[in-house]
Image (cartoon, rainbow, N blue to C red):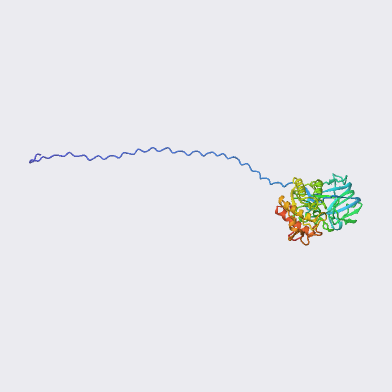
Amino acid sequence: MAGCGSTTVEEEPVPPPETEAPVPETPTPEAPEEEPPPPEEVEVEPIEPQPVPEQPRPPPPMFQPGFHQALRWSYSTGGVTFRLRVPVGRAGDRVRLAFRSGDGNLVLRKATIALAGPEGSLASAPVTVTFSGTPGFSVTARTRVVSDPVALPVGFRDELAVSFEVQGALAVSAIHALPGSFVRSGSHTGVTGPLGGTPWDRAVGLATVEVEGPPARAFVALGDSITEGYIDELDDTRLAWPSVAETKLGVPIVNAGVSGQGFYDALLNLDAEVLVLEGITDCVVLLGTNDLAGLTVDKLQARMSSLTERLRPFCRVWVGTLLPKEKSNHGAYETVKTQRLEMNAWIRDTFPDVIDFESVTRRPDNVHLFLDGLVVDGIHPSAEGHRVMATEAARVLREAGVQPEPGVVLPAEGEP
């Protein structure tokens, strides 16, 4: 319709804005789920049972000396039976005996061994000793004969009775080493009671008693009358310093001392009296006193060196200092005094293993004199002197690691 000066305009309807439809999200394709890898197959090797480690086997038993004497001299007799009372410093279940002839032929007809009883009697049944299966032997001069092993259990420091019927020349000691022994004319090796006859106290015929047991330290002492055990009519190998030290240590220290000898004699007889021993591990040398007046210090030292060099392949060598000497039976005493001091100083400076016997036997105010009570005649120690020497030897060896043989119980300090 028309109006006064106005114009009506019809507006076209405006459609409402279109609402955008939501665009659907395209799902992200999921990664396919990985399957877990199959478990690895572990090969298990079968475990073989391990053998139990073997315990170290103990070394086999061996024969080592439990008694020895260097029988330098000779004694001849008709048909007699000796019964020697012998201390042994080694324990075991079997023994062997070594006999030695003197300066002539020797026939041994029978021999037995047993534990020793009082007054020449036996404390166990006598066991027959054989030699290569026979009851005796016949040999020429200066021959050593070793018996077959004999089953006889013995303990450390037991006393044995060795009875043997002999005729001819037997090797013998210079001093009275074995009190408690007897000799009787005739054949009496099987007598179990007191043998009767006559007391006899020299080591004769029987040189060595070996005892079979676990291997252990075994010593031999080389020397002169001081080591052999001369104590002015009170001789007894049990009182000599090697035997006393043996008791204190619990190991055998057998005696190869010979009265009167010097270096020359010791070197000359070394093979027959020392190196013949089996199972020795250590040697103690106390020599030179008898040479002080007759040799210069240079010669003394040279002969000591020769002796120790010959011993070294055989044993560990211990060297003892020379004891005080209050007099000289041979040669100028002033020379003896001077050379003894020089020799002792050289021993201390030269040898790695020294037993200083002088230091425990001398007076503190005079190096040439013994302490009171330790000497019998100005040269030879008394029984107390031997005990002091033995105590020092045992101390030095113990500190160097020497231990008692298995099963040996030592006496308490201060006990005999």
Frontmost residue, 348 versus 352: 348
Say which quarter of the image contains residue 175.
bottom right
Q: Position of residue 164 (x, y in %)?
A: 87, 50
* Residue 216 appears in view: no
Which residue is at the far bottom?
372
Say which quarter of the image contains residue 355.
bottom right
In this picture, residue 127 sits left or right of residue 407: right
* Residue 317 appears in view: yes
**1 up-or-down from 315: above or below:** above
Q: Residue drawn at (70%, 54%), measured in percent from left and top?
A: 399
Q: Position of residue 52 (x, y in %)?
A: 66, 45
Frontmost residue, 193 versus 147: 147
Say which quarter of the image contains residue 248.
bottom right
Frontmost residue, 60 versus 226: 226
Q: Position of residue 86 (x, y in %)?
A: 83, 54
Frontmost residue, 83 versus 199: 199
In this picture, residue 52 sits left or right of residue 33: right
- Quarter of the image with the N terminus is top left
- Quarter of the image with the C terminus is bottom right
Which residue is at the far left?
4
Q: Position of residue 135 (x, y in %)?
A: 87, 46
**Number of marks in the image?**
0
